[in-house]
Amino acid sequence: MEIDINALKKEKEKNFDERLDFIDKYVEWLKRTPNKVWSAHQKEFIDSVYQTHK
């Protein structure tokens, strides 16, 4: 099996760019969303992770 290093580098760069874009969008959402709403989302997420690892 032959590995295309250039294709892997492009995929890594694309993934990195997508993560940065997600972070930017999430920060904007946090700025315009009341604390009560986003903290409820965080609680849901943390509780789901906790339940998964019980």
Image: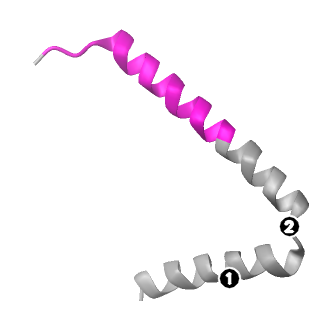
Which residue is labeled 1 in the image? 43
Q: Is residue 1 left or right of residue 37?
A: left
Q: Which residues are magenta?
A: 2-21
Answer yes or no: is residue 45 visible. yes
The quarter of the displayed image where residue 29 is located: bottom right
Q: Against 31, is 20 above or below?
A: above
Q: Position of residue 46 (x, y in %)?
A: 60, 79
12 shown above or below 38: above
Q: Which mark sits nearer the N-terminus, 2 or 1?
A: 2
Left or right of 50 on screen, residue 5: left
Q: Position of residue 15 (x, y in %)?
A: 51, 33
Q: Quadrant of the C terminus?
A: bottom left
Q: Amino acid at mark 1?
A: Lys
Q: Tell me what residue is drawn at x 37 percent, y 20 percent.
A: 8
* Residue 33 within the segment the image draws in magenta: no
Mark 2 and mark 1 in contact? Answer it, CB < 8 Å: no
Q: Please say whether residue 53 is visible from this viewpoint.
A: no
Q: Is 28 situated left or right of 4 in this image? A: right
Q: Residue at x 88, y 75 (%)?
A: 35
Give residue 9's quadrant in the image: top left
Q: Toward the viewer: 43 or 29? A: 29
Q: Residue at x 53, y 23 (%)?
A: 13
Q: Quadrant of the N terminus?
A: top left
Residue 24, image x, y percentages: 76, 43
Q: Secondary structure at mark 1?
A: helix
Q: Residue placed farthest to the left in the image?
A: 1
**Left or right: where 53 falls relative to 37:** left
Mark 2 nearby-residue class (10 Å; few <14, some 14–19, many ≥20): few
Q: CA distance from mark 2 to mark 1?
A: 15 Å
When asked about the image quadrant of residue 36, the answer is bottom right
Q: Which residue is mark 2?
A: 33
Q: Residue at x 65, y 45 (%)?
A: 22
